[in-house]
Image (cartoon, grey):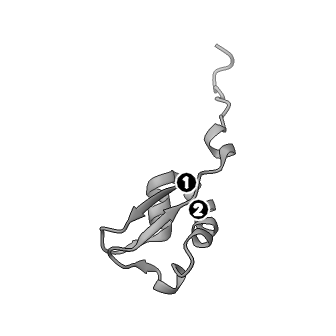
Amino acid sequence: METVTITRERMTLDLLLWRRFGGAGRALIAAALTLNPGLAALGPVLPLGTVVTLPEPPLETAQRSRKVLSLFGDA
């Protein structure tokens, strides 16, 4: 697991997870709070110097693929 130290003002947990994991970060908020007891008590904006342990991203998110649809039929 990766740890991050907050070095920017106005950083929230959901913003931190979004910057690290993109859209998949929303699903990791509960896991991040479980890994970091007491983090929620700090309030919505994380104080400078706070160390946050980041959860591992879900494997299904990392391996998901999309089928590309064409408006012009199969080429």
Q: Where is residue 4 drawn, in percent x and y?
A: 41, 62
Q: Which mark is residue 23?
A: 1
Residue at 64% x, 45% y is: 61
Q: Where is residue 66 drawn, in percent x and y?
A: 65, 34
Secondary element at tag 2:
helix
User: Alpha-carbon neighbours of circle 1 within 10 Å: few (<14), some, or many (≥20)?
Assistant: few
Mark 2 vs mark 1, CA separation in Å: 6 Å
Question: Is 26 drawn above or below residue 57 in the view shown?
Answer: below
Q: What residue type is labelled 2?
A: Arg
Question: Is 30 drawn above or below residue 41 in the view shown?
Answer: above
Q: Where is residue 57 drawn, in percent x and y?
A: 60, 51
Secondary element at tag 1:
helix
Q: Tell which of 69 and 54 is nearer to you.
A: 54
Q: Residue 72 carries which label?
A: none
Residue at 59% x, 67% y is: 29
Question: Contact, CB < 8 Å: mark 2 with mark 1?
Answer: yes
Q: Which amino acid does label 1 sit on?
A: Gly
Q: Tell which of 28 and 51 is nearer to you.
A: 51
Q: In this view, does 51 lie to the left or right of 14?
A: left
Question: Is 9 drawn above or below residue 53 in the view shown?
Answer: below
Residue at 30% x, 74% y is: 9
Residue at 33% x, 73% y is: 49
Q: Where is residue 41 drawn, in percent x and y?
A: 52, 86
Q: Mark 2 points at which residue?
A: 26
Q: Is residue 15 left or right of residue 7?
A: right
User: In the rendered view of the protein, which quadrant contains the C terminus?
Assistant: top right
